[in-house]
Image: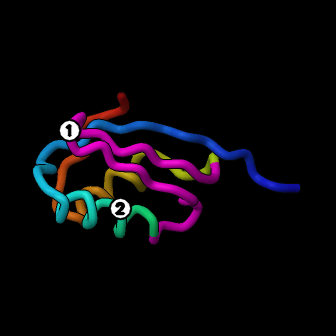
Amino acid sequence: MSETTATTTYRVDGMTCAHCVSAVTTELAAMPGVDGVAVDLAAGTVTVSGASSTDDAAIAAGVQEAGYTLVGRR
């Protein structure tokens, strides 16, 4: 039996350039249960898809590790 896939969009503070996009994408894509990461620099958001077990606290920790602040869900 496979896990359910979920997609969640978060607001992220501090991203200003392509390097920011790369840092957040790399950090989150390496997390267990994450299948896809899409950053919208202009909107200041990141959309994460993957296993339904991926939680907000883990995503927040990954964003912080990349050097940015997760503001909340969009």
Quadrant position of residue 32? bottom right
Kindly state the secondary structure of the residue where label 1 is placed: loop
Residue found farthest to the top: 74
The residue indicated by pointer 1 is: 42
Say left or right for 1 vs 47.
right
- In percent of width and height, residue 21 lies at 25, 58
Quarter in which the N terminus is drawn: bottom right
Of discs 2 and 1, which sits in the foreground?
1
Mark 1 surroundings: few (<14), some (14-19) or many (≥20) residues within 10 A: few
Q: How crowded is mark 2: few (under 14 residues within 10 Å), some or many (20 or more)?
A: many
Q: How many labels does the image show?
A: 2
Amino acid type at mark 2:
Thr
Give coordinates of residue 74: x percent, y percent: 36, 28
Q: What residue type is labelled 1?
A: Ala
CB of mark 2 within 8 Å of CB of mark 1? no
Could you tell whether 18 is left or right of 56 in the image?
Answer: left
Q: What residue span does the magenta drawing correspond to?
A: 30-51
* Gap in angstroms between the C-alphas marked 2 and 1: 15 Å
Residue that carries the numbered disc 2 in the rendered image: 25
Q: Is 23 placed above or below 42 here?
A: below
- Magenta span: chief secondary structure: strand
Residues 29 and 32: in front is: 29
- Give me the residue at 25% from left, 66% from top: 23
**Residue 30, image quadrant:** bottom left
Quadrant assignment, res 25: bottom left
Helix or strand or loop: what does disc 2 sit on? helix
Magenta-drawn stretch contains 38:
yes
**Residue 55 horizontal side relative to residue 52, left or right:** left
Query: Image point 19% across, 60% down: which residue?
Result: 18
In the image, residue 32 lies in the stretch drawn in magenta: yes
